[in-house]
């Protein structure tokens, strides 16, 4: 988490989407052996780094809840996101989302989000919730338990072409667009 937060410049106001299969962490096929204990350990580690850096973690549910996202109501309202009605449980939403929901003061589910970065533990497919343009990030810890770990952070699209400049010039008098 620390590596990703530094590479992706995650700080106050930024959003991190977390997708995690506790089944995969435990060494079984995704969706077949969810474990709230594993989810709780992951939550604690993520919360520690989020507390230090100031970013907001949101937790992706499984496909049974249309990959909606668990977050605090205050964040949903601040971002103007659409709330959806469900409560994640291990059998519908996943153990990670269920544990996250239980850990929050005023949890809600959002239909979608455009996160600044994401971590995918166990190949849960978080890409639909990342802002454009996602930049792959390979953490030094490639596995948690038996689950493969992938991550990404995002950057603004580079718009332009041959004449585009992406950094402010150091001198003035560059001319005009003629």
Image (cartoon, rainbow, N blue to C red):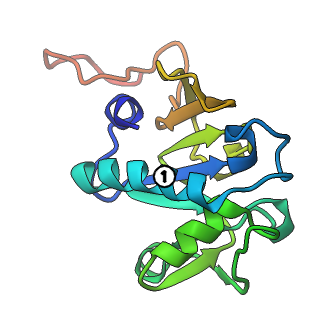
- Residue drawn at the location 36% of the way across and 38% of the way down: 5
Disc 1 secondary structure class: helix
Decide which of 101, 71 is in the foreground and name it: 101
Q: State the quadrant of the C terminus.
A: top left
Estimate the x, y position of residue 177 in percent, counting from the top left.
Answer: 40, 24
Q: State the quadrant of the N terminus.
A: top left
Estimate the x, y position of residue 97 in percent, counting from the top left.
Answer: 63, 65
Decide which of 110, 96 is in the foreground and name it: 96
Say above or below: 79 vs 121.
below
Is residue 95 visible in the rendered image? The answer is: yes
- Residue drawn at the location 32% of the way across and 37% of the way down: 9
For label 1, the residue is 41
**Residue 51 falls in which quadrant of the image?**
bottom left
Q: What is the tally of numbered marks visible in this picture? A: 1
**Residue 54 falls in which quadrant of the image?**
bottom left
Is residue 113 visible in the rendered image? The answer is: no
Say above or below: 76 vs 124.
below
- Residue drawn at the location 70% of the way across and 41% of the way down: 26
Other residues around mark 1 within 10 Å, as few (<14) / some (14–19) / many (≥20): few
Decide which of 6, 114 is in the foreground and name it: 6
Estimate the x, y position of residue 101 in percent, counting from the top left.
Answer: 56, 74
Estimate the x, y position of residue 57 in percent, counting from the top left.
Answer: 45, 58
- Residue drawn at the location 40% of the way across and 48% of the way down: 45
Say above or below: 126 vs 166.
below
């Amino acid at each position: 988490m620390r590596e990703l937060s530094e590479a992706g410049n995650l700080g106050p106001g930024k959003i991190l989407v977390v997708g995690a299969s506790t089944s995969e962490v435990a060494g079984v096929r995704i969706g077949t052996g969810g474990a709230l204990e594993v989810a709780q350990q992951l939550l604690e580690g993520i919360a520690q780094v989020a507390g230090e850096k100031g970013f907001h973690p949101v937790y992706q549910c499984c496909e049974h809840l249309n990959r909606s996202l668990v977050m605090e109501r205050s964040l949903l309202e601040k971002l103007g996101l659409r709330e959806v009605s469900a409560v994640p449980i291990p059998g519908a939403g996943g153990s990670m989302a269920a544990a996250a929901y239980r850990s929050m003061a005023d949890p809600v589910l959002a239909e979608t989000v455009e996160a600044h970065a994401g971590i995918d533990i166990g190949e849960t497919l978080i890409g639909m919730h990342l802002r454009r343009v996602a930049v792959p990030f390979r953490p030094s810890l490639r596995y948690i338990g038996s689950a493969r770990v992938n991550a990404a952070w995002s950057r603004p699209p580079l718009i332009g072409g041959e004449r585009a400049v992406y950094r402010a010039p150091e001198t003035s008098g560059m001319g005009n667009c003629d």
